[in-house]
Amino acid sequence: MIRPIVPVEALLDELWLDLDELCRVGGVDAAWVHERVAAGLIAAQPLGPGDAWRFDAAALRRVRCMAQVERDFDAVPELAALVADLQDELARLRARLRALGLE
């Protein structure tokens, strides 16, 4: 039986990470994540009562982008979040152009 090929992006969109996994894969520490979640710069889904969170693939992309901007440009977290927002918007607009056959 031949299995259909599933794009990696589709698999990643179903990915959920806990805080330790996000920190390991994103190259940041837990305190860094806690500060940005508390400031509303990174979305975290609560796992229930307490301080346990889970993060989706979009949060992982955002963490990687923000950490790189903060590190490379010595940027404050709010500026890094703005850059991540702009990159996401640019990706959405490019996808719309591709869907319309204009890119």
Image (cartoon, rainbow, N blue to C red):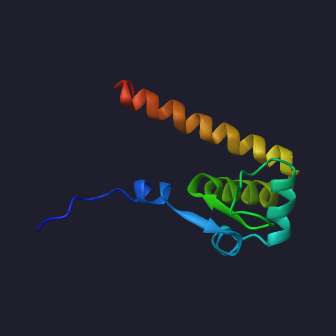
Q: Quadrant of the C terminus?
A: top left
- Which residue is located at x 52 percent, y 30 percent? 93
- Which residue is located at x 63 percent, y 41 percent? 87
Looking at the picture, how far across and down is residue 73, in whole percent?
82, 54
Along the viewing direction, whichever of 50 and 99 lies nearer the viewer: 50
From the viewer's perspective, tell me whether residue 36 is left or right of residue 86.
Answer: right
Please identify the quarter of the rendering in which residue 84 is found. Answer: top right
Please identify the quarter of the rendering in which residue 30 is found. Answer: bottom right
Looking at the picture, how far across and down is residue 14, in whole percent?
48, 58
| Residue 43 position (above or below residue 50) | above
Q: Quadrant of the N terminus?
A: bottom left
Please count the marks in the image. 0
Along the viewing direction, whichever of 1 and 92 lies nearer the viewer: 1
Looking at the picture, how far across and down is residue 25, in whole percent?
63, 71
Looking at the picture, how far across and down is residue 24, in whole percent?
67, 75
From the viewer's perspective, tell me whether residue 74 is left or right of residue 12.
Answer: right
